[in-house]
Image (spheres, rainbow, N blue to C red):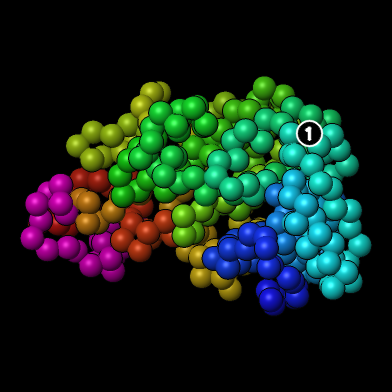
Amino acid sequence: MIEGKADIEIEGVFYNKWMELSRNLSIEVIKKIPGIKVLDAFSASGVRGIRYKLEANVEKVDFLDISKKAVDIIKRNLNKNGIDGNVFRSKFEDFQNFNDYDFIEIDPFGSPSAYIPIVISRMKKKIFYLSVTATDTAVSCGKFPKACMRYYLAKPLLDKSCHETALRILIGYIARIGWIYNYNTTPLMSFYYRHQIKTIVKMQRGFVDFSKIGYLKLKNKQKYISKYGYGPIWLDNYYQKEYINPNYPIMKIISEELSIPYHYDIHEIASYLKAKELPKIEEILSSIKASRTHFSPTGIKTEEYKEFLELFT
């Protein structure tokens, strides 16, 4: 199996071809963080860590998985690709050497929420990086609100824009855990794609900034930031411009999004207004201050809500 520059065996271990874009974008971020040591946890085939070494030239990459089959496959894949690296067979929570690494990859099956405090609480470094993937989007998108409160300590918003709220819930959760241990959180790149949400964040000790966490309020379908409501969510940017590679269409769209923590779905708004016709996206963008969003092809980011609604009449 060829992915990027890696030639890997995948028989008997989990491999999701739809995660290739996630790995591509993560590599673009890591290229901008030189000299780091990576722990690829929940490694499965090891494809992500192997590609980090081959394509981002990280200083070191080691692998962690509880499965004996995965450990055997990873070792074969390392040999196949000419890479040196330690392969640890252990539960994530039993691993004791997080401080040997600058960049921790957390990509479990389902929710990553239980693993984030484990890393942050054990870290002694002034700066480190977390790369977190969540595939439990039904939870953070609001289909199971009690589970979202349990796993992310947040109230989700179930509507057509829920994937943005879900991503901001995840980042907000990381930030709040970071606060406990005097770490500030800076998202370097975050996105939603095919039932997964992904964020890569920089964690740095220092004065904690509480202003980047808040809530969404919803009234007559209008969204605005409030002191209570849905959330808590991350209100600030979920990427940094220097990590954008515009050759990837999803990154280009992300870089052009308005910097507000919500968007609207034109079909949902049309249903609310009982509108007979939908305005064209191009008409909306030329009529008001608005942008597209990578969260949905029918999503619009705008703060000009009244003017937005008038386009449906």
Image quarter (top left, top right, bottom left or bottom right) of the C terminus: bottom left
**Residue bearing the label numbered 1:** 94
Left or right for 178, reference 217: right
Q: Quadrant of residue 245?
A: bottom right
Does residue 91 appear in the picture of this structure? yes
Left or right for 308, reference 2: left
Left or right for 198, reference 106: left
Residue displayed at 75% across by 57% down: 69
Q: Quadrant of residue 54?
A: bottom right
Residue at far right of view? 84
In the image, 66 versus 274, the foreground residue is 66
Residue 215, given in percent of the width and then of the height, sits at: 41, 30
Image quarter (top left, top right, bottom left or bottom right) of the N terminus: bottom right
* Magenta residues, start to end: 270-290
Q: Is residue 261 above or below residue 191?
A: above
Residue 50, given in percent of the width and then of the height, sits at: 78, 64
Which amino acid type corresponds to the residue marked 1 in the rendered image?
Asp
In the image, 267 versus 132, the foreground residue is 132
Residue displayed at 75% across by 39% down: 91
Residue 179, given in percent of the width and then of the height, sits at: 65, 25
Residue displayed at 79% across by 29% down: 122
Q: Is residue 267 above or below residue 162?
A: below
Q: Is residue 303 above or below residue 31?
A: above
Disc 1 is placed on an element classified as helix
